[in-house]
Image (cartoon, rainbow, N blue to C red):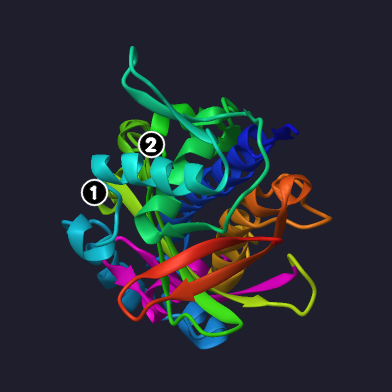
Amino acid sequence: MVVHIMICAMHQGEIMKLIGKLISWLLGIVVGLALVFGVFVLVVNAKYKINLFEVIGSLKKLNGNVDVATIAPKAPTDDDYASAMTSANRAVANIIVYDDENKEYSLNDSAKTGMIADLKLTNAETCVLVNLMLKNGDAGVKFNAGGKDIDLKDYDFKLVQIALSNVAEKSADVNVVVSVDLTKLKNDMNNFPLNLFKNKVPQKLYVSSTVTVTKGDAPFEYTVASKSLALNNMSGKEVSQLFNVVNLVAKIGTADEFNEKLGKTFIDALIGNENNASGFAYSLKSIGASDFDFDTDGTNNYYVVRYAF
């Protein structure tokens, strides 16, 4: 029996579109601040309850040094790739393969045997799995920001971490950390008024999205709700106010709306259902997968694809 894993380009495209939006929103932030600061400070504060002085002050955190080990302590190492292959192949033979010549791992687009056990992955191994999904896809994404066409391939998008926490019988919190390099964006901010805020845009942006995933009663049924969003060292109310400022010049939605959409994109890639058949767990249904799950042994948390014994 052959299972075709179709996650690749579609989910890569969805993820990259969201990151592209975020980059364009960063441009909107600096444009928005340039337009409203000084002239509209009092009006903005009175009408929209946005304290621009606080927002501008918090931008220091956006541009400060980021301790990656702090924001992504469960990021995978090289050893986790070998571990992920062992764990996944224990459930579905050769679903992850290693190329000795090129020294790289990849997803096997046609695993030729059925499931024989639950597929159970640690945090780091789950991140490896999604990175391999992204690697299998070659979709590039272009978008327009400030009148410029931008290709995300120029922004070195990376998935840094996936980590589960608060694992319960029917739910878990899922944190996803991604990074984009904004060097090219900053190099294009040489004209007024963007040059006034060039030093407020970080060289690298880390987006840490946490959502709560709740299992439904039916197999592969789930809901996703926003829990928290951080940008570099900025979090909580600071991120919410930053999004509110951008909304003054571009209707982009709230921080919670963006966070839920970003988190759901990764969850859809991991799980899937009848409406999203390319999700990893659902794509294994034809060879024996019965549902997804989250599990914990008190020390480690796990993403699980259940086998229908």
Q: Say if the magenta span includes residue 241.
A: yes
Q: Answer with left or right where residue 292 lies relative to residue 83.
A: right
Q: Which picture quadrant has residue 157?
A: top left
Amino acid type, callout 2:
Leu
Which quarter of the figure is the N terminus placed in? Answer: top right
Q: Is residue 286 above or below residue 41?
A: above
Question: How far separated are the C-alphas under marks 2 and 1?
Answer: 12 Å
Q: Which picture quadrant has residue 223?
A: bottom right
Please name whichever residue, 256 or 167, is drawn nearer the observer in this view of the structure: 167
| Comparing labels 2 and 1, the label whose residue is closer to the camera | 2
Residue at 65% from the left image edge and 56% from the top image edge: 268
Work out whether mark 2 precedes mark 1 in sequence or the reverse, and give the earlier one: 2
**Stretch in magenta:** 221-249
- Residue 269 at what x, y percent from top left? 62, 50
Name the residue carrying label 1: 199
Residue at 59% from the left image edge and 35% from the top image edge: 144
- Residue 122 at what x, y percent from top left? 39, 60
Q: Say if the magenta span includes residue 303.
A: no
Query: Can the viewer see residue 244?
Result: no
Q: Answer with left or right where residue 17 lies relative to residue 125.
A: right
- 10 Å crowding of disc 1: few (<14), some (14-19), many (20+): some
Name the residue carrying label 2: 185
- How many labels were placed on the picture? 2
- Residue 148 at what x, y percent from top left? 54, 30
Q: Answer with left or right where residue 233 lies relative to residue 134.
A: left
Amino acid type, callout 1:
Asn
Mark 2 secondary-structure assignment: helix
Q: Is residue 260 above or below residue 250?
A: below
The reply to whether discs 2 and 1 touch (Cβ–Cβ < 8 Å) is no
Residue at 57% from the left image edge and 43% from the top image edge: 92
Q: Is residue 279 above or below residue 82?
A: below
